[in-house]
Amino acid sequence: MAAHCCSGLSGEEAQALLSQYGPNVVEKPRQHPFYTLLLRFWAPVPWMLELALVLEMILGKWPEGIIIGLLLLFNGMLGFSQERRAQVALELLRERLHIQSRVCRDGQWTTLPAASLVPGDLVYLRMGDIAPADLRILDGQVLVDESALTGESLPAEREVGGTVYSASIIRRGEAAAHVVATGGRSYFGRTAELVRTAGAKSHLEILVLSIVRYLVAMDGILVAAILASAVWTATPLEEILPFALILLVASVPVALPATFTLATAMASMHLTRQGVLVTRLAAIEEAAAMTDLCSDKTGTLTQNRLELSGIRSLTDPPDEAHVLAVAGLASDVATQDPIDLAILKAWADRASPLPERTGFVPFDPATKRSEAGFSCNGESWKAMKGAPGVIAGLCLTGGGSWEKEVENLAATGARVLGVAAGPADGLKFLGLVALADPLREDAVDLVRRLDSMGIQVRMVTGDAPATASHVAAALGLQGQICGRDVLQEDCGVYAGVFPEDKFHLVQNLQKRGLVVGMTGDGVNDAPALRQAEMGVAVQNATDVAKAAASLVLMQPGLQGIVTAVETGRRVYQRMLTYTLNKIVKVFQVALFLGLGFLFFHRFVVSPIQVLLLLFANDFVTMSLAGDHVRSSPRPDRWDIRALVGASLVVAIAWLLYIFLVYAAGQLMLLAPVASQSLDFLGLVFSGLANVFLVRERGHLWASRPGRFLVLATVVDVVTVSLMAWSGWLMARLPMTAILGLLLATLLYTLFLDLIKVPVLRYLKVA
């Protein structure tokens, strides 16, 4: 077909339509970094600190206000910097390729950037072109590779009236076509828009809100009791209100979001070295909780390429090599047809030359076959391959029970072609060749390993149930085979699924309380990748799929998924330690401050010391982000009630300890300010000891703590001890009292370890 007929738009018409529809590009969302930073201060924990900051400023408590402000900035900047680093690692929704298109404008064919196309433009497609927009064919026929959109390896034929979608590749043929949709209105653009609107709520957000709810409820009760006591004892409000604010700050898990961010950021750097790029830090925490992995078949569990999977010779005696040789004659590398390439590769592997051809006719959708001419014993012969029914109809002899053989091969998920050869008036049906998309080498091992980790793998494919069943059996997948009409059912394989069904399947599983992972490579997978808690784009995925995913595998194979799950579960163990420690310390500190005021009618620790305590304990425990831990054997789920229950038991024991420290100060006849220093040291030492107590679910000596945790603890103990000994920011204490308190804390910790182990086992906090 020649591209000489040209009756497209005029330049004026195209310019008017360009103004109406806009350029043929998919705009990627842009967010100013300053706005992103501000969002770090718009959450429950920052709100409480911001309220305390404002009230401290109103009351003129500048030192306390400055410290609270520093806490806010530290938390916000840490989270912002780590998320920013992760996002820069991958350009979300990168600019589409700068495609050039042959367009008819003002009666002449010209080459223009694809961005300037408008609906109604007449374009011309040739082999190797990338479709610049959604097109409807007016003349000609093409073989279209839509794997970038659908993920399916087999190309599709498009004739007059057929639609060629934006970003698909022309593998064979030529055609003239009208542009029917551009930019965001194209299939590509609609998918990108669905990606932007998809997304599941982070379980980390839910966790933080749950913890804050418990702690604030306890703090509210204490503050109400303190205010009632103040009214009863006629204590001035200007003395009580600052104390109530400090109590509020002490109850807020200030460093919780920052510690989660730091832990996941360190894990993301580790994963990057393992060939897994993390584009959304929360996905690491979601990987620990993932219960189900929905895996696209083509290009994910399979290699997204065709290879010869079987040959059936229908002659007597059977001669499979002859069948393959004839199929090779009827193929040509110039067509770049995946079927031809697979057959020629299989023949080349046998290191046997093909006879010289005298002619070749590529595959024609109208005849459903390709053919070649060659000479056999001085006689002109034909070699053909194509649809088995078509080939059988052209042959006078051979074939036998070819229908049964076709059914058997097709049941394995293969595409079956008939092969014939002979004189034009005496073609003989020689046999069948089967082509299939082979499994990835690591796919079976991946399914087995994920199953041992308590994760159910569900295959999602557009293949027919028979094909899906064969692949599922080869992979060892469990569960029944279901169609797209029962996406809400609990199935191991979902067959015959349309691209848009994957998104709804993930949503249905999430509604059942499951934490869902999704793997994929095509544009059509992008919405489901975004919706899933852990969307995984494989190495050869399209840019849109990578932009939508939260994890991108940068190496061949799927081992990165197992690595991500194991890493996420180790992060969970570190954060479980931090969370247990934080809840214990909040209970201990808040109850000690509140009950101390109610019982003794004085501040057992000064407000400035409470704020120093946040730095001394909370931010030292951030070194837990790199602690040595073992990954969990099963998916991890945050059970806040169990956490609070276990924390309360340990906190009561530490509360008893700190009241004993207070009593010791009274027995030592310390001045009230010196007694506050002793109480402060008791809270710091017990806080550090509690980290080592709860970091191990068994006895605290069962595993070696991380180097940074030990170093931070030593620095913290030395620093606060020197502050108390020198009298800086607090009343001075003798070194003998400091060392005696440190020794008493160590002995008490060993005693508590005997209580902790059975408590955690009983409440199933693992």
Image (tube, rainbow, N blue to C red):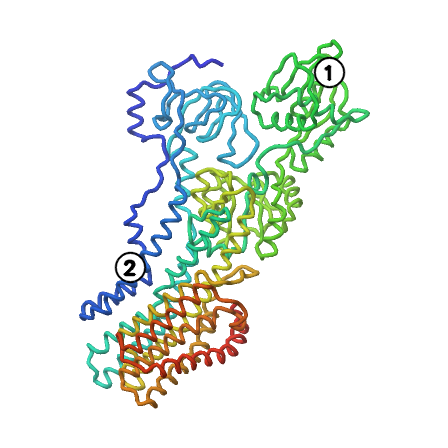
**Front residue of this view, candidates 640 and 242:** 242
**Residue assigned mark 2:** 73
Task: Residue at 38%, 73% (x, y): give it.
Answer: 717
Above or below, 562 against 191 in this view is: below
Above or below, 26 against 7 in this view is: below
Task: Residue at 18%, 70% (x, y): give it.
Answer: 60
Q: Residues within 10 Å of mark 2 (few under 14, many from 20)?
A: some
Q: How many marks?
A: 2
Residue 512 visible? The answer is no
Residues at marks 1 and 2, CA–CA distance in whole angstroms: 82 Å
Q: Residues within 10 Å of mark 1 (few under 14, many from 20)?
A: many
**Residue assigned mark 1:** 422
Circle 1 SS class: strand
Image quarter of residue 355:
top right
Tell me residue 745's x, y (percent).
43, 79
Tell me residue 471's x, y (percent).
64, 42
Tell me residue 258's x, y (percent).
37, 60
